[in-house]
Image (tube, grey):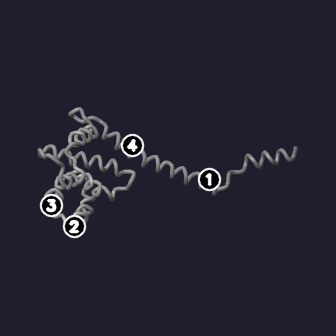
Amino acid sequence: MKSTGAVLGYLSSSAPPSWFMNTIAFWGWVMLGLMGIGGFFMFRKFLKVLPKADGKSKLDWQNYWVERSRPLWTDESKAFLDELVQPVPGPFRDIAKHSIAAEIGKIAVESGATEVTRDHCIKGYIVATPKRDYKFLMNFLQKKNIDYTPYQHLINK
């Protein structure tokens, strides 16, 4: 009987080692952080799907402009777009390419062009991307010996 009491006393009064509890707490915070980051990106995607005042969402408009401009794209303009989105990390490249292509297509269709040109690609890239990406664009255009002064008004917005 004495040994059973000692075992029960040991089990009820002893806590898990502190290193174990600290590990559990650490991984708990890591999981909460990762779920928060994932939730942020899911919420951003959700906002893009919500319809605007005209009844179409941002994604609906992107799909519309890509489909509308599909016959205007040449092999050269597709290759140029591929070069423009090259620095985007692989998992996000297709999404970035689609949104930039939609803006390029919109500019080409609204200008009444018969095909998408480098000029349309550069303008569409500037309009579709945030300012932090302009530095890459200017370096890229300098390497390709393309003058970007006609686009300064768009870059300096």
Most foreground residue, 69 or 127:
69
Q: Position of residue 67 (x, y in %)?
A: 24, 39
Quickly name the residue at label 2: 142
Q: Which one is closest to the eye, mark 4 or mark 2?
A: 2
Most foreground residue, 31 or 127:
127
Marks 3 and 2, how far apart in space?
Answer: 14 Å
Q: Tag 1 or tag 4, which sits nearer the N-term?
A: 1
Q: Which one is closest to the eye, mark 3 or mark 2?
A: 2
Q: Is residue 79 above or below residue 64?
A: below
Quickly name the residue at label 1: 21
Quickly name the residue at label 3: 152
Marks 3 and 4, how far apart in space?
Answer: 34 Å
Most foreground residue, 74 or 102:
74
Crowd rating for badge 1 (residues with CA inside 10 Å; few <14, some 14–19, many 20+): few
Amino acid beneath label 2: Gln
Identity of the residue furthest to the front in this view = 75
Quarter holding residue 39: top left
Marks 4 and 1, how far apart in space?
Answer: 31 Å
Q: Secondary structure at mark 2?
A: helix
Quadrant housing the C terminus = bottom left
Q: Are marks 2 and 1 in contact (CB under 8 Å)?
A: no
